[in-house]
Image: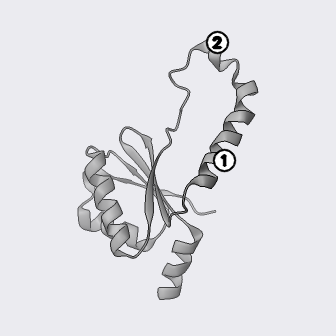
Amino acid sequence: MPILRTYFMNRLSDDELQSLLGKRDNFFLENVLNMDRTLQYAQATIAQAGLTSRVVDEPANPFAHLRHDILGAIPLIGPLWVLGLSALRLGQPAADVTLKRTAAQSISVIFSRNARRRNTEAA
């Protein structure tokens, strides 16, 4: 299993981000100060490559703001939560690239197997 690399947007130019997206390897992007602009730029770059993308809000710790008494119910709610999320994902169209907002200033960039395979076939 490859180790996902982390890059820092405050040290990365648009050309370097474009190059990273062109490699079609999964990576993390931290210190994203202008989230909307970065996502728009990434989606435009992905579209220019003939791929589809989607943005998903998936915080690394979704339960950070829950009260302690609610946290105790998680073992009961967990299986239902996972089932509900799975049903929602089945209804979403597949994308070549998923941009996951995992925190206020971080994004996980995840390429589908098909997108990675098309990159190796083109090379």
First in sequence, mark 2 or 1: give its number: 2
Image: 68 above or below 77? above
Q: Are marks 2 and 1 in contact (CB under 8 Å)?
A: no
The quadrant holding residue 104 is top left
Query: In the image, residue 44 lies at what x, y percent?
Result: 31, 65
Rounded to the nearest whole Å, what is the CA distance between mark 2 and mark 1?
26 Å
Query: In the image, residue 75 lies at what x, y percent?
Result: 74, 26
Looking at the rendered structure, the kind of residue marked 1 is: Ser
Mark identifier at residue 69 = 2
Would you call the spot at circle 1 few (<14 residues within 10 Å), some (14-19), or many (20 or more)?
few
Residue drawn at x 29%, y 53% as measured from the top left: 38
Would you call the spot at circle 2 few (<14 residues within 10 Å), some (14-19), or many (20 or more)?
few
Left or right placement of residue 104 versus residue 63 in this view: left
Looking at the rendered structure, the kind of residue marked 2 is: Asp
Circle 1 is placed at which residue position?
Answer: 86
Mark identifier at residue 97 = none
Quadrant containing the N terminus is bottom right
